[in-house]
Amino acid sequence: MNADDPSLAVLIPAYNEADVIADTIAAAKEIHHVSQIIVIDDGSVDDTGKKAVMAGAKVIRFKHNMGKGAALREGYAYVDQADIVLFLDADTGNTAKQASLLIQPLLEDRADVTIARFVCNETYKMHGGFGIVKGIAHWGIKVLTGQRLESVLSGQRAFKKAVLDKIGIRYNGYGIELGMSADILRAGYRVMEIDVAMVHRYSGRDVKGFIHRFRQFIDILMAILAVSLSRRRRSTWYI
């Protein structure tokens, strides 16, 4: 890493976020050391891609919705020689600038990966989910790594590029955060959770919200299975 003049690439997967994507990009531009902002328009049927271009981001477009994992993999292929790679959710809007708090520990070599830990949101507690998906994710990380990670499902993450080059982005859909968290912890990288005052959309307790959480649930279970099978294959090989 170039400590004197580090460079930061920002990856923003987006699906139908036309109303907020420009604000997210503008906020990302305020983060020090940003050299690239790449938006992956994951098959949006609104003006997400168009507004991202107008806001000054490089935009990669999928014809169909491929999921967050596929979007991040594609976006990463376009990253230049960055020292740090930041993942941002498209719906963080103006609060995306808080992601700057994730960068300093990497520059100071106090961590290899940082994950945003959202300050408690009372609105989410009242109208969001019931915590079942988060509970499964916490259990999965504990079983797979023997460690505890509070913000398993946080999409706001910063990596030393060398870490991503090593572990890759090999999970799909909503299982991407849990799967990568397990890989990072099992590889012995230093992970630091950072409190941030960020906000994003939450899935309510309506039909749409329950469908969203069911998809999360399935993808997370698939990621747990994939990590478990990967670990078993390596153990067998060593024997």
Image (spheres, rainbow, N blue to C red):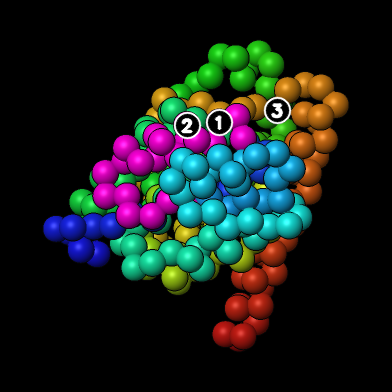
Q: Are marks 1 and 2 in contact (CB under 8 Å)?
A: yes
Residue at image x 58%, y 53%?
Answer: 40
Nearest to N terminus: mark 3 or mark 2 = 2
Q: Is residue 177 visible?
A: no
Amino acid type, residue under disc 3 in the picture: Ser
Q: Amino acid at mark 2?
A: Asp
In the picture, measured across the screen, residue 193 lies left or right of residue 1, that is right
How far across and how far down the image is residue 116, in percent? 44, 38
Q: Nearer the viewer, residue 177 or 94?
A: 94
**Would you place residue 233 above or below residue 126 in this image?**
below
- What span is in magenta? 18-38
- SS at badge 1: loop
Among numbered discs 3 and 1, the one appearing first in the sequence = 1
Q: Is residue 37 above or below residue 234?
A: above
Q: Is residue 35 covered in magenta?
A: yes
Q: Amino acid at mark 1?
A: Val
**Residues under numbered marks 3 and 2 in contact, where contact means CB atoms less than 8 Å apart:** no
Return the residue at label 2. 23
Name the residue rendered at 59%, 44% in the picture. Answer: 50
Question: Counting other residues with Cα less than 10 Å from the Cα at mark 3, is it few (<14), some (14-19), or many (20 or more)?
Answer: some
Distance from label 3 to label 1 (Cα)?
Answer: 16 Å
